[in-house]
Image (cartoon, rainbow, N blue to C red):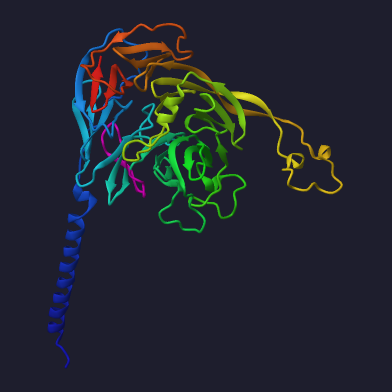
Amino acid sequence: MTLSPARRRRIDRLVAGGIALVVLAVAAVVYLTSDVRATDATTVPRGTVPAEPTAVPSTLSEKWSVATDPAVGAVASPYGVVVTGQGTAAIAYDARTGERRWSYDRGDEPLCAIGSGDTDAPGVTARGKVRGVMVVSNKNGYCSQVMLLDPATGERHYYRTSPNQPGGALAFGGPYAGWLGPTLVELWRDDLVRTIQYGDEPAPPKPNATHTGCTFTDMIIDDQQFATVEHCAGSPNAQVVLNWTTPDSAPDKPDDQDVFKHTPRATIDTGSTAARLVGITSDRVAVLVSDPEPAVVRYDTAGREVGRTPVDVPATSIVDADRLGDGDRTRPTPAVRDGSTRFSVVGDTLLAVMQESATVQTTPTSTATRPTTEPPTPGVLASDTATTPVTERVEDLTVGWTRAGVLGLPAVIGDQVLLPVSGGLAPVAAGNGNPGIVPTLIPVDRGGATGRVDVAAVGPTIVEIRGDRVVGLS
């Protein structure tokens, strides 16, 4: 039977209407279950960035106080805000007044972490570093939702999803940020594109790509390489493993080396039961070891020891710092970077490690230094194959000073380091820590609060992060 044109048009309209209803229903379901609907974000106009502080205050009193989740902490940003974690929300406050500025709330997803690598405030669109406040939320058992926010406005900048393990932490260094999990590490460049995944990969795309049997307890990142401290089955000693930050771009890389499958630059047996990472450059890594005595050991990119400096850091503090925390949580060594100096806190000791250019002589590996188990080349004497020492310029590391009795991370103001200590803040010279001198104390009334205190300077305000409270002083 042939349908009339009018009837065909009526049936076509009914079919089209049915399709439209199905599309609308699917769209409604997607929206109702989407991250967009579950996200409540409040942004503000861009304000004035405070000037960098240049002088240590002589007196301080509390101006404001807000709560934060102690498991998440808080971020004091040079853009003039302090970002706290409260439930599922990251909330920013004006560092000078304590007034609420912006918020970002994934209402159905608990916060895993907030962090930032910002040391200046050129704007989040400036390339070369991971800029902004990073908020990591938990979804489906992973700390997978990674959002980079503009500290000045709260606007979303970049976003990615990764299989980040719970119990991990953010790390920043060079032009990278990353997540240190108990058995899995990822690094991301400034637009949050992944450059390497290392460890117990959940879905390895190639055979023999995973690195299993080891627990990661520390990580430190530089432009070309990053290091991890690992405790592996069958070994009593802490290992330090050096990897390229971007394996695809590594020189002389194997053809099958990429983001997921890669050969470490070096695997180092520290000979110590515990180790913490306190400095890194493109040529060196500085490792604080507990055995046979506390010392900072410097290794080159081949894993060879090139220097060892005993330090006044209790061995028990190093061992305690190298353990997983409650709930098998792993954390990088707390540190702040100012110019060429990295200030790390281990236990109640502050350790300053400085980067400097140095000229060194090295002897390249040759057949003269082959293992004794390898037979010599017939007719060739070892003396004939020995290579001439090579002079090269490297970015080296040196131990500057240590200072005991600190409560947490310091603030750096000009050429002074403001140490959080019992009863207040103690300024010392950034260059040498004022050895043998008792610094003048700037009293701070902490109202009986005990525990760790991290300090930061944001414009004219000194910010103290005290566990579950963040306090503005001026």
In this view, which residue lies farthest toward the right?
A: 379
| Quadrant in which residue 41 is drawn | top left
Q: Front-most of 256 and 377?
A: 377
Q: Residue at x 39, y 24 (%)?
A: 347
Lateral position of residue 2 relative to residue 283, left or right: left
Which part of the image, by quadrant, shows the N terminus?
bottom left
| Quadrant in which residue 95 is drawn | top left
Q: Front-most of 208 and 461?
A: 208
Q: Residue at x 38, y 7 (%)?
A: 439
Instruction: Judge whether residue 177 can be spotted in this image.
Output: yes
For residue 129, above or below residue 427: below
Q: Position of residue 389 (x, y in %)?
A: 74, 31
Lateral position of residue 182 relative to residue 16, left or right: right
Lateral position of residue 210 relative to residue 447, left or right: right
Instruction: Judge whether residue 196 can be spotted in this image.
Output: no
In this view, which residue lies farthest toward the bottom?
A: 1
Q: Position of residue 13 (x, y in %)?
A: 14, 75
Tell me how many marks there are: 0
| Quadrant in which residue 68 is drawn | top left
Which part of the image, by quadrant, shows the C terminus?
top left
The stretch drawn in magenta includes residue 110: no
Q: Position of residue 249 (x, y in %)?
A: 55, 46
The stretch drawn in magenta includes residue 164: yes
Q: Position of residue 434 (x, y in %)?
A: 45, 9
The magenta segment is 147-166
Q: Front-most of 17 and 236?
A: 236
Q: Front-most of 104 and 14?
A: 104
